[in-house]
Image: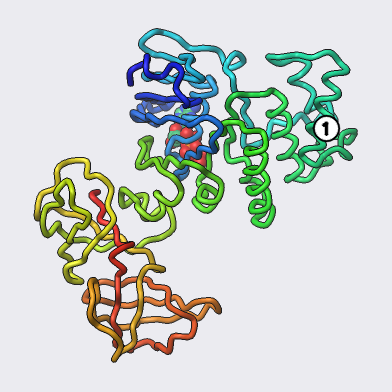
Amino acid sequence: MNMKTLVGSDHSVQISGLQKHFTRPHSGEVTRVIDDVSFSVPQNSFFTLLGPSGCGKTTTLRCLAGLETADSGEIWMNGQAVFSAAAGRDVSPDVRPIAMVPQSYGIWPHMKVFDNAAFPLQYGRKTYPRAERERRVRTMLEQVGLSEYADRWSTQLSGGQQQRLALARALLCEPEVLLLDEPLSNLDAKLRSQLRAELRSFQQKFGVTTIYVTHDQGEALAMSDTIVVMNRGRVEQIGSPSEIYDSPATRFVADFVGSANLIPGVLDRPAGSGDRVVDAKTTVGVVRCERFTTPPTPPTPGQEIFVCIRPENIRIIPEGGETHGPNRFPGRIVTTEYLGDRQEMVVTVGDVSLRAHADAHLRAHPGDDVTVVLDPAWTVALWS
Ligand code: ATP
């Protein structure tokens, strides 16, 4: 990345070529936990690092916060380099324009709610006289719905209230960038879904650039403007929630975000630069894919690819129904499960089993012969 292009850009945070390894204390084994990670976070956006446990999300966030030092690469915040391995620059955490809410919230049990929230205004980067501190804290506690708890011990708060207090304290630092590490993971499912909506609306209200770490794909899809999917320290894909869900770039993304059917095959003919369709030869038949991301290398006929289709994009037509059109294949129902609003089915097409969602009222039973339609508009060719 050219440093000059970063200055004055409308990205709050930019990471380029970040690498980080850890050495295990006893065995001396070296593990590279961040492997050439680069991304740009647009100003005022909600940006999520999504991936399975151990893929390097927290380490990336800690590098942003200055709590870990990367081996190589650069980190820019608001046009300033806060880290550059080549230039030997590593701005200390308390000077970086960030506030971080760790997974455990970092609330002090020996302090009351008000004092927890007021702490950064008394001892932090930017301090205020007592009266102004009090005004700011009371306003913030009001905004996060904790006014009436100001004089309670922080240990007397529920999990959701502690989460709000941690957020209030972070926002009181007036950070340019808010870093949130799995802030909902200690809460029960109902509270999680309520608080994810709240978090998102706080982010919009305060207009603060937010980098959020989670392994929960539902959370990432619901809250984010942009998602980075990480796997084994590398970036698999960067995109909006619908780009990630509807046009996954790799098998890993297709499988990790939602659950997709994956059919192995080979490229039937090369996709030219202007082509809008990829044909894949599979044991199901030739499948037309109208979705695919730019291939990493020029595609060649016969190269191995995967066809990805989500259960909701498969249509089941009972015997005797319409059989003409693209991506229609003879299949047989193996199992059906009635869920009220839909039926979930397993159907076989040749030697491939596919999960499909069908209309709740479709009269279909295990053993029935059907036509299985893979909607070409939602069928994705995956290059890896
Ligand atoms: P989780 O969702 O479980 O928190 P994560 O994606 O945030 O996972 P990291 O916490 O970044 O993953 O860890 C990435 C890898 O680095 C893991 O294999 C972890 O064991 C290892 N790791 C993290 N910190 C250290 C450390 N200080 N020393 C050695 N290895 C570490």
Q: Which quadrant of the rendered structure holds the N terminus? A: top left
Q: Residue furthest bottom?
A: 320
Callout 1 secondary element: helix
Q: Against 215, is 138 above or below? A: above
Q: Position of residue 338 (x, y in %)?
A: 50, 81
Q: Position of residue 340 (x, y in %)?
A: 55, 79
Q: Residue at x 68, y 46 (%)?
A: 198
Q: Nearer the viewer, residue 17 or 30?
A: 17
Q: Residue at x 47, y 41 (%)?
A: 226
Image-based side of 52 in relation to 295, left or right: right
Q: Residues within 10 Å of mark 1 (few under 14, many from 20)?
A: many
Q: Residue furthest front?
A: 274
Q: Residue at x 64, y 32 (%)?
A: 101
Q: How is the image coloured?
A: rainbow
Image-based side of 302 in relation to 265, left or right: left
Q: Residue at x 67, y 48 (%)?
A: 195
Q: Against 266, is 364 above or below? A: below
Which of the 4 quarters of the picture holds residue 211? Answer: top right
- The mark tally for this picture is 1
The amino acid marked with disc number 1 is Val
Give the residue at mark 1.
113
The residue carrying mark 1 has its beta carbon less than 8 Å from ligand 1: no
Q: Position of residue 102 (x, y in %)?
A: 62, 33
Q: Position of residue 341 (x, y in %)?
A: 54, 76
